[in-house]
Amino acid sequence: MSAKKETFFQSLWNFFCSLKLTIITLILLAVTSIIGTVIQQNRPAAEYIQQYGESTYRFFLSFQLTDMYHSWWFLALLVLFCINLTACSIKRFPHVWKSVRQPLLVADETQFRLSANADELLVDAPPARVRDQVADFLGGRFAAPTLTEREGRLHFYAQKAPWARLGVYVTHLSILVIFIGAIIGNLWGFKAYVNIAEGTEESRVWPQNGGAPIELGFAVRCDDFEVTYYDGSNRPKEFMSILDIVDQGQEVVSDRKIIVNDPITYKGITFYQSSYGPAGDPTVQMRVKPSSGGEPLEISARQGEQVALPGGYSFAVTGFTPSYNQFGPAVQMHLNTPEGKHGNPFIVLQNFPDFDARRGGEFAFALLGFSQPQFTGLQVKKDPGVWVVWLGCTLLVLGSLVAFFLSHRRIWVSIEEQGGRSRVRLCGSAHRNQPAFELYFDQFKKDLRQQLAPSAEGGRDGGK
């Protein structure tokens, strides 16, 4: 007789229920995720070209490797994995649900004979008396039993943690919930950045992958920005911003300090302290002392500004750096004569105030200080699916704990009259961690024998 040929839909269903499909999909997701980690995502095109070259960059674009988590093929892998996970769960769930809600109350002969955890003994007492002893023992030692009378025999059934069988399905569900949360975040969320100079505000942010700026619907104002350095170096120790949130003309958040790993969130949009930099030309404070004598002058000057000096002279600061060859802050400047002759540029160091006097010019300059306006660089993230992801993660932890650390344990006991005595048979099983259950069952049957002693004798394994 020839085997019944599968229909197209049966073949398709079996394909999606295949464990091989699960393994292959997981391997592909793992490999592609490694690629997405090695190749930085959503960076400017110039950065990719500088690092990999133009031809490689075009190759990346053709396979969407610069934004692979939004690529059609990666989303297709996720959808395939979700369908596979759902199909496998639907196929196997009815059997598991039946074993939980409608357990097998009566074990048959085959189960007693073939079970790896079984025992048999004769008790010199009528079944009615043994029944009460077995019921008390099961209830006290394992779980409250269910008694079934069938064909002149008494059948006990007891179980523990039947819901442990559902742990794996909670885990499957959690993965789907996490995927749903990620999809929500991708569809309705964004990752962007914004630079805000001190004393200014901004109501738009710029997506990391380019494109038009995004309107926030409120403004973020930077009241102040500060950076501190490790002693003796220009390596930043900490930088922070003082931000305000202005919504519809009202300052709803005032003087909120943010630092790295301590962001601010408003209306589901989170602002992370990310970077900083100079915003505009600095203003320097100079002390100018005429070489011919006289009182020194203290003057504030902006970079590029011509500043008048006594005798028709003038000077201008043409450059500034907070660190000049590890000598600290310095300015580059030049001195103009009364005839308007442009002098040669020279360097003035803040940490060496007498250094310029050695130049021997008409004036000796010393840098007293400077003020450099800064901008604060903020990473901006909106992810409306984050709470769905957290829900999925919680389910994943709970489902994994149940699936790996709890086991559905079952014990059957049968009592029948045999020559004026009682024949007691028992067997048990666990759907997980069989070695631990074997140890438990060995001790269980020994204790049951002692409970029924001194009238018990014999057994499937000789009563050991």
Image (spheres, rainbow, N blue to C red):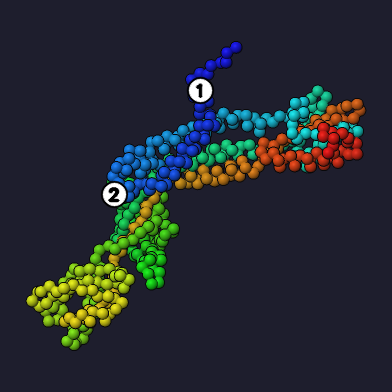
Distance (Cα) linking label 1 and label 2: 48 Å
- The crowding category of the residue bearing disc 1, from other C-alpha atoms within 10 Å (few below 14, some 14 to 19, many at least 20), is few
User: Is residue 374 positioned above or below 7 on the image?
Assistant: below
Task: Answer with left or right where residue 287 lies relative to residue 272.
Answer: left
Q: Quadrant of the C terminus?
A: top right
Label 2, residues with CA under 10 Å away: few <14, some 14-19, many ≥20: few
x and y, in percent, of residue 406 in the image: 65, 42
Residue farthest to the top, as pictured: 1
Look at label 1 and name its amino acid. Answer: Ser
Q: Determine if residue 63 is in view.
A: yes
Residue 84 horizontal/vertical position (percent): 50, 32
Residue labelled with disc 2: 46
**165 or 129: nearer the viewer:** 165
**What residue is shown with label 1?**
11
Secondary structure under tag 1 reads helix
Mark 2: which amino acid? Ala
Q: Nearer the viewer, mark 1 or mark 2?
A: 2
Quarter-of-image position of residue 124: top right
The numbered disc on residue 142 is none
